[in-house]
Amino acid sequence: MKQTLLLLLFATLCAAVSGEDHALVIQTDFGTKDGAVAAMKGVAVGVDAHLPIFDLSHENTPYDIWEAAYRLKQSAPYWPAGTVFVSVIDPGVGTERASIVLKTKSGHYFVGPDNGTWTLVAEELGVEAVRRIDEKLNRRAGSEKSYTFHGRDIYAYTGARLASGKITYEQVGPLLDAKIVSLPYERASQKDGVLRGTIPQIDFHYGNIWSNIPDSLFNELKPQFGEKFLVVIFHNGKEVYRGVMPYAKTFGDVPEGAPLLYLDSLLDVAFALNMDNFAKKHELSSGSGWSVTVERAKP
Amino acid sequence: MKQTLLLLLFATLCAAVSGEDHALVIQTDFGTKDGAVAAMKGVAVGVDAHLPIFDLSHENTPYDIWEAAYRLKQSAPYWPAGTVFVSVIDPGVGTERASIVLKTKSGHYFVGPDNGTWTLVAEELGVEAVRRIDEKLNRRAGSEKSYTFHGRDIYAYTGARLASGKITYEQVGPLLDAKIVSLPYERASQKDGVLRGTIPQIDFHYGNIWSNIPDSLFNELKPQFGEKFLVVIFHNGKEVYRGVMPYAKTFGDVPEGAPLLYLDSLLDVAFALNMDNFAKKHELSSGSGWSVTVERAKP
Amino acid sequence: MKQTLLLLLFATLCAAVSGEDHALVIQTDFGTKDGAVAAMKGVAVGVDAHLPIFDLSHENTPYDIWEAAYRLKQSAPYWPAGTVFVSVIDPGVGTERASIVLKTKSGHYFVGPDNGTWTLVAEELGVEAVRRIDEKLNRRAGSEKSYTFHGRDIYAYTGARLASGKITYEQVGPLLDAKIVSLPYERASQKDGVLRGTIPQIDFHYGNIWSNIPDSLFNELKPQFGEKFLVVIFHNGKEVYRGVMPYAKTFGDVPEGAPLLYLDSLLDVAFALNMDNFAKKHELSSGSGWSVTVERAKP
């Protein structure tokens, strides 16, 4: 009898130790000078004192939903299934945009406003289900009078409860149609050996140019390391850069200052100068209006 | 007999698992480019390998004690009781200012120099007790020759020992009078329907203006959402902004670029432009010399 | 029989709880606006959901290996033995520089490219052993096509496996000669009462000047607090600053704005202005070409 009890306690304990906890990963455009991110984390720690909490970034350009979408694409797939992402780039806080939790087919959860933030992870990881957050059940106690900080009062709270297993996905709120608000953007394509894509982000820290042309499309050209490619970059349809560069495995394969075409860490086609800043040197940027073509250079 | 032993072990284990640990939250003006914050965390991890450690912010304006005080007010109340805050904005390091641990009536602990940093949390959370850190007992071993980094050698070390339960609050050191050094500032007031307050901080990231007028005072005017208010902002007594704006529940209630009066996330009266930067547009700032009046607009 | 089983389970559980985990501490030059650091952490959490993960800094000047070396010297010694540091300032990613794990005599581990990053910690903590990372065994599954993000695919992965005890140090890969690539720099010296040293870093946040003259060398002059010293700073051999200042215990020992010589938090000789920015005021910097002499001032 006592042994049965012991085993039961033991099982409970094992569950506690093995850690049903999943990580909570937070992205905002609040910056880290402010106390706002710390207030969010305090709410999460109040839900579960031992929740593993991480930052994606808090330096997202204010209100830039596209950038937030790209940062999620850049990092979420590398986290284990069960990880809960809270993303608060929310120019419409307090308006009628839905507050949701997206579950992807990969088993990741995404908590925040349904304003386009989930565009790229939805595509890449697949939409399994979408639930509207029931704010009657999933709201920090005492926050009823607060209308402008859903990140703290609803999203961090709900994300922490989900990550720690305090609520199930079903307890988030009612099921919606399995689709999210998507930001429109042009897909990469290949025709007659010419690749066409956009520049969703630059690697601002080093000045490398990231396209949205995936390796699968690039491989249709059957490229070999060392072969030369013609790269043309356009802004609002006007050519702003034209150059020939080798397809290199890595930066050190070309001399310092020389250009190269390579596959970036997401295995998309990218352009860089070894040990120099391509974007700054040629005044290139990313986002709406920026596009690129790539084709094998004429011999 | 064996079962008794097992139960005993089991109880010990449960205590370990249930986690007596409380979170340690650190604020400094060191920035994060430097190795100084990491040295502080190393000391804390050396005390307890599994201590949950978080950042409030390390980007506090160097030496700006008032800003530090405001960041604590903005975040500390959202953390659970038992959380230990270490704050090192310490222009007087090594001089005679006391090193203390403040315990508030809310059950939070605040570790650092008694130089005004605790002004606002002491008011908001209430002073339960103040103890001077006994540096003979509570100092990192081997740090005796170091006089300029109390953040690492005393505060992180003592904070970690307290958060992890390695010492009790009583073991911090001798009890002092239950009061702390307070920075002087003007309280908000209401007279004949005119609210008068200061601007303790701007929401620098978005340019919103935060006053120190609490919702309780504002509610004396019995405001309704949509009603218009006259807002006048002064710098050193000189009027620098005058405008009429509605009391809005949230930003999206007014057109883009339009001003609004709202309650910020601390439920203080605040002013903003929807999707624009109020402070930058009108060259407004915060701190000493900045004040504001609010009254119902004449029809 | 059942009790034996229970005890066995219990022992396993105790091991799990007592936390074989050591901390993983990450340094990069990626910045934190980007999703790259978060991708690295995701990989580490995928290895062990409860690994304690910390940032040294991600704001290292891009490609500046010397700065990275200094930040490690500034923080690593304050972490407990067993801590695993991953440092990715890696201009040569994908080239032939070795990927190693250095074990120091102090019991710390350092994971990353062998490009000079370990110069100062190797000296200070002593080289116990160096192993080349066997990328066949120690590489994130599915990363075979990725050549430009070893930080995520190899270093974070291997560091997390080592910190969590999933692999032993021996399983990192084959033993190399117990030495690492060292950046050349001039050691501090004393001759006829004149100390000569370099300026490896400035305390950029406050503008204090840190020399590489250790307290042991300074103490050969038998200095007393309050005694005056002549400090001369050179850039590329040309004198750019000359001043007399007291040896002070701490900043508050001199008037605001006045210069002082003190021992910094690493107990090296340093120079500052109390509550002012020495480096900015006198246009001083650090690194190659910057040196300093210190001697007792003539009465």
Image (cartoon, coloured by chain):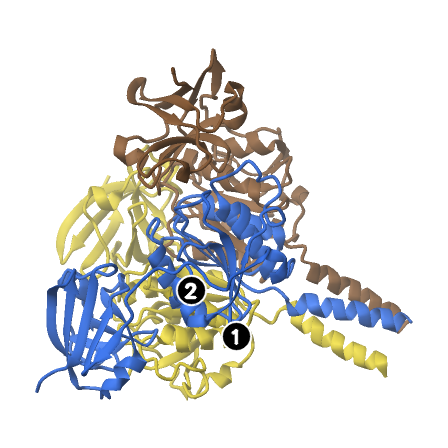
Chain colours: A blue, B brown, C yellow
Q: Position of residue B116 (x, y in %)?
A: 48, 32
Q: Residue at x 38, y 69 (%)?
A: C87
Q: Position of residue B229 (x, y in %)?
A: 40, 22
For the C terminus of chain A, which image quadrant?
bottom left
Label 1 close to label 2 by CB (< 8 Å): no
In the image, C120 versus B274, the foreground residue is B274
Residue at image position (30%, 37%) is B257
Quadrant the N terminus of chain A occupies: bottom right
Chain of the residue on which disc 1 is drawn: C
Left or right: residue A101 versus residue A136 is left
Q: Say whether residue B103 is visible.
A: yes
Question: Along the horizontal axis of the image, is B37 left or right of A288?
Answer: right
Picture coordinates of residue C28 (x, y %)?
A: 35, 65
Give the quadrant of residue A221. bottom left
Q: Is residue C163 above or below residue C95?
A: above
Q: What residue did someone put label 2 on? A: C38
Identify the amino acid type marked 1. Answer: Val
- Looking at the rendered structure, the number of numbered marks drawn on it comes to 2
Q: Chain of mark 2?
A: C
Q: What secondary structure is found at the residue carrying circle 2?
A: helix
Location of mark 1 (residue): C47
The image shows residue C293 at horizontal and vertical percentages of: 23, 53
Label 1 residue SS: helix
